[in-house]
Amino acid sequence: MLSIVEIDYGTPKAVSEKTVALQIDGKSIHVPEGTSVMRAAAQAGINIPKLCATEMLDAFGSCRLCLVEIEGRKGYPASCTTPVADGMKISTQTPKLAQIRRGVMELYISDHPLDCLTCPANGHCELQDMAGVVGLREVRYGYEGANHVFAKMPASKDSQIALDGRAAAPVANPLFAPKDESNPYFTFDPSKCIACSRCVRACDEVQGTFALTIQGRGFESKVAASQDNRFLDSECVSCGACVQACPTATLSEKSLIDKGQAEHSVTTTCAYCGVGCSFRAEMKGEEIVRMVPNKDGHANHGHSCVKGRFAIGYASHPDRITTPMIRANIADPWRIVSWDEAFAHVGSEFKRLQAKYGTHSIGGITSSRCTNEETYLVQKLVRAGFGNNNVDTCARVCHSPTGYGLKATLGESAGTQDFDSIEKTDVVLVIGANPTDAHPVFGSQMKQRLRAGAKLIVIDPRRIDLVRTPHIKADYHLKLKPGTNVAVLNTLAHVIVTEGLVDKAFVAQRCEDDAFAKWCDFVAQEKYSPEAMEVQTGVPADAVRGAARLYATGGNGAIYYGLGVTEHAQGSTTVMAIANLAMATGNIGREGVGVNPLRGQNNVQGACDMGSFPHEFPGYRHVSDVATRELFEKAWGVPLYNEPGLRIPNMFEAAMDGSFKGLYVEGEDIAQSDPDTQHVTAALSAMECVVVQDLFLNETAKYAHVFLPGSSFLEKDGTFTNAERRISRVRKVMAPKAGYADWEITQKLAQAMGYPMNYEHPSEIMDEIAALTPTFHGVSFDRIDELGSIQWPCNEEHPDGTPVMHVDEFVRGKGRFMLTEYVPTREKVNLERPLILTTGRILSQYNVGAQTRRTANVMWHDEDRLEIHPHDAEERGIASDDWVGIASRSGETVLRALVSERMQPGVVYTTFHFPESGANVITTDNSDWATNCPEYKVTAVQVTRVSQPSEWQKRFRAFSNEQQSLLEQSAAPQPASTLGPA
C-alpha cells in the first residue's frame, strides 16, 4: 500500500502540453491529453472505486469496479483504461453503476476471509474501503463451493452433493495455499489475494525483475513467485514494490503486522547509496512502523530497494553505543563518561598534541554517510579550529578522480544529468558500474528504458546482470582486462576519429580548437587502434569498432560509470577519456546524454561539495586562492592556512614517522574500508588520540581512545546530495539515542578547542554554506521544502536548480580535450601471482556492512566470497564452497570459493562487506596518480585451496574478541542526568 498520507490517482500522470476539456458529474475539468478518465476525476476530487488500478502502474482494467457511463457511448467502460476526449460527459454515480459495483464486490468478498478486525491491513485496506464505498451490505455466496480461504473443504450434509464430488468429511482444499513467511520482511497470504495482478505488474513495470506471475486460469488463478517457489527461494529481490502495490493484506510488512497501522508520516531521504531515494517514515510516536517510498520523490518516484525500504533495524540494534567512552590505551577497558567530560578530554588532548608536536599533528576525516551540514562543520573545525587543512574524506577513496577529471575537461566536478534524463537516451554505455546491485532503484529505471528499445554497451571485466537479464541483452559487452580502461576508451576514440564519426559542429562551437586537434592526432595513432590494443585489453577489435559506431551514431548517448572507473591507478585519466568521448560525439548539454558518475554512498557528492579535501574549500576552490581564503577568513573570524593539508595516506605515513598524533573520524571505518589494512592499523596504533564518532564499535573504533556515539539518519535534520547533484532534506523522526545529533557533537568539540560555533539548527549551517558557495547561493531548507529537492547549481542564474548542466556552454567556457596516455598499472601478474583480483558490491549489503550486517539482509549474503572462473578453479582443484587462500604482495586472507561463469579466466572477484573477510588486507598501496584514490580494482594474487584461516584472520579474531571484552568491561554508566546534553 501507498503511504497513509498519499492520494492514489489510479493511473500515471499524462505528460502533454495539449489540454482537453470535459465534464465529470457535471463538473467542468481541463486536463492534459492522454489522462485517464479515472485520474481526471481524482484530480477534480471525484473518487471512482478501484482495485486493480494504482498510479504507480499502467492501467490494466481487470477489476471492473471503476466502470463509468459516457454520454453517447454504449456500455460501461473502465475509467482506468479510457482516455479523456474533448467534450466528454461522464457520469461516475448512477443506479446501474452502483448495482454493477456491488455485484463485483460481492464476488470478491465471497472468496476472501472475513477477518477484517484482526487483519494487519485493517484501517488501510483498499478492499475494505471499496466494500464500504459501493455500499456492500450482504454476500449471497457462501464458502460451500470452491474457495481459496479454508485449508479444508467443509463436510457436506447432503449425500447427493457428496456423490457429485463433495466429501462427507472435511478434506484438503486443493485451491488453498498456506501463508509464506520465508521472507524476513514481509508475508504472502494467498487466501487474501484477489488476483488483481498489481504485484505482478509492479515486479515487471517498476522493478523489472519478473519474479512474479499469475499461474493457472479462471478461478484457479494465483500469484506465484518464480516457479511456485517460496519468496525467499525465488528470483525476488525484496524491493517491496509488490508489497506497496498490494491493495489487501496479501502482501504485508512484518513490521506492520507486529506494530499495527502508523499514525503519522515524516518525509526524509535514504542513507544508503547515491540514488538518494525519498521515503516517508511511517511512525507511531517515535517508533518506526515502516518505510514507504515517496511517490513524489524526484530521484526514485515511489520505488526503493531492499536496503532503503527494509534494512533500517541497525538504528535500534543492541550493538548501538549511546554513551561517550574514553580510555588511555587501546589495551584498556573503556570508561563511560558524561558528554561534558568527553568534550573536555578531546579538547585537552588535541591541544596537548599540537603544543608538543605542532599545529599540523592532528586532523579530521569527514563521512559520506553524514549530512552536508555535518560534513561542512568537520572541515570547518579542522581549518578554523585546528588551524590546518588536514581534512580528508572517504569520497576521495572512491570518486575523487571524478572531481579531478570532470573539472579539467568540463569545468565542474559533478555529473551532468538527472536520473530521468535516461528516458530520452538511445544508447546507454555502462563502464565500471553495476547499477542493479549498487544503485538498484536507478538500475530498475535503466532496465525499463532498455526494454523500451535503448541500446546497451557494457564495459566490465565481469558479466554483470545487465549484460543479460529478462528481456535485456547488451549489444556489446567489452570484457576488458582489469586496469585497461584507458586503453579501451582510447580505442573507442580512435574509431570515432579515424572513421569520421566526430560531431564536428558541436566541437567547433563548444570546445577548444587546439586541444581538440591535439587529441585527434593523439588517439588516431596506430598504437590505439582496436587491433593494436587487442592483446593488452583482451577485447576483440570487431567488438570495439561496433561499440564505437553505436555510441557515436545511435542517437542520444549517455555514459554511466562507477568505482570500476575511478578506483584505478589511472582513474582520473579514465574520467577525462570518458568526457573526451562525450564531447567528441556531441553527447553533452541536453536530456538523454551526458557523463554520469554513480556515487557509491548517500552523500559522496555532498562530502566533496562541502570542502572535505585537504586542498579545497567548499565549492571546489583551492586553499591557495587569496580571494576565496579571505572570504572564509572573514566569515569564520580566524586566519586560515594557505597550503593543502594531508590526505589520508599522508596522515598514515606521518603517523608512522611520529609527526601525526591525533585524528577525529566522523562516521568512517578506515580500518576496514581503506586499502592495505595492516598498514592502516599500524598507523592508527601509532597515534596518541584517535577519536571515533559512530553508531557502533567499528573496526576503527577498536583502535580509538575516545568514542563519541553518533546519530543515525533518523535522528537528525540536514541534507544529502545524491549522484545527480540533488539536494534533499533529511528530517528527524526521533530523538537522538545518545542525546546529540552529529552536528551538535562537532560543534561541542569546536567549543572545547576554543573555537566558537553556536548554531541552533542545521538550517543555519546551510544558510552559511549558501552564503559562501556560489553554486549554493539559492539553497535553503525553506526552498528545498518548497521544491521538494534542488539540483545545484542553484543561484541567481538558476533559481530552481539545474537538472542538466553545460546546456549552452561548459562551466569552464570551452570544453577541453585532454590527452589520455595509457600507462599500464605497476601491479603485474607473474608466476607467483598469476590472477587479478577486483572488488565490488552486492545488492543486499552496503559498503563495509556496519549497517546491513545488523539487519535480516544477512539471509541473502552472510559472508564475502571469492568468485573464480571454472577454468581457474579446475586448475587449482577448487570447487564452490571450498576454503581458498588469496595471497598478494600486501597480505593474505581466506574466503569460500564461488565458481562462476560471470568471471573471465585470470580474474577473480570479491566483495568487502564483512570485516573478518579481510578483502583490504590483500589490496595494495597503488593509487591514482592525481588524487591518491586507491587502486582497489587491480591486485595480483594467487589462489589456493586451504583448510584454515590466514594468520591475519587469526590475529583479527583474537584482537576483536579482546576489544569486545574490553567494551563489556566498561565501567557502569553514571546516572542519566549527567550523561545527556549539557
Image (cartoon, rainbow, N blue to C red):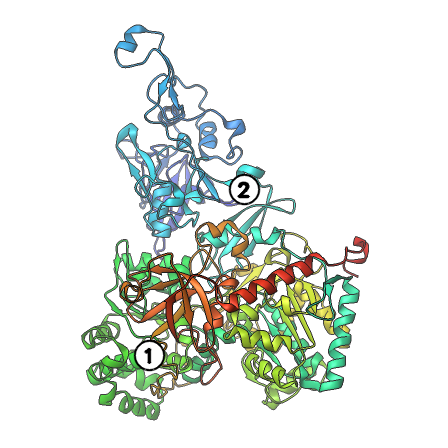
Q: Please name the residue shown 77% across and 62% down the image.
A: 337
Asked if residue 706 shows in the view, the reply is yes
From this view, report whether residue 777 is shown above or below residue 436. Answer: below
Q: Quadrant of the C terminus?
A: bottom right
Q: In the image, residue 951 lies at what x, y percent?
A: 51, 68
Rendered view: 618 above or below 692:
below
Q: Nearer the viewer, residue 256 or 328?
A: 328
Left or right of residue 412: residue 353:
right
Query: Residue placed farthest to the front in the image?
Result: 947
Q: Circle 2 sits on which residue?
A: 255
Secondary structure under the numbered disc 1 in the rendered image: loop
Depth check, front residue: 313 or 472: 313
Q: Are marks 1 and 2 in contact (CB under 8 Å)?
A: no
Q: Look at the picture and state if 821 lies above or below 331.
A: below
N-terminal-most mark, 1 or 2: 2
Q: Nearer the viewer, residue 857 or 409?
A: 857
Secondary element at image label 2 = helix
Residue type highlighted by circle 2: Ser
Q: Residues within 10 Å of mark 2 (few under 14, many from 20)?
A: some
The answer to whether one can see residue 595 in this image is no
Amino acid on which disc 1 is placed: Leu
**Residue that appears at 37% across and 35% down:** 66
Q: Position of residue 378 (x, y in %)?
A: 64, 73
Estimate how packed mark 1 is, as few (under 14), some (14 to 19) or many (20 or more) residues with alpha carbons within 10 Å: few
User: Residue 607's x, y, as percent?
Assistant: 55, 72
Instruction: Locate residue 60 relative to residue 697 in the image: left or right.
Output: left
State how far apart marks 1 and 2 are (Cα).
54 Å
Q: Say which residue label 1 marks.
A: 831
Q: Quadrant of residue 158?
A: top left
| 666 with respect to 804 (left or right) | right
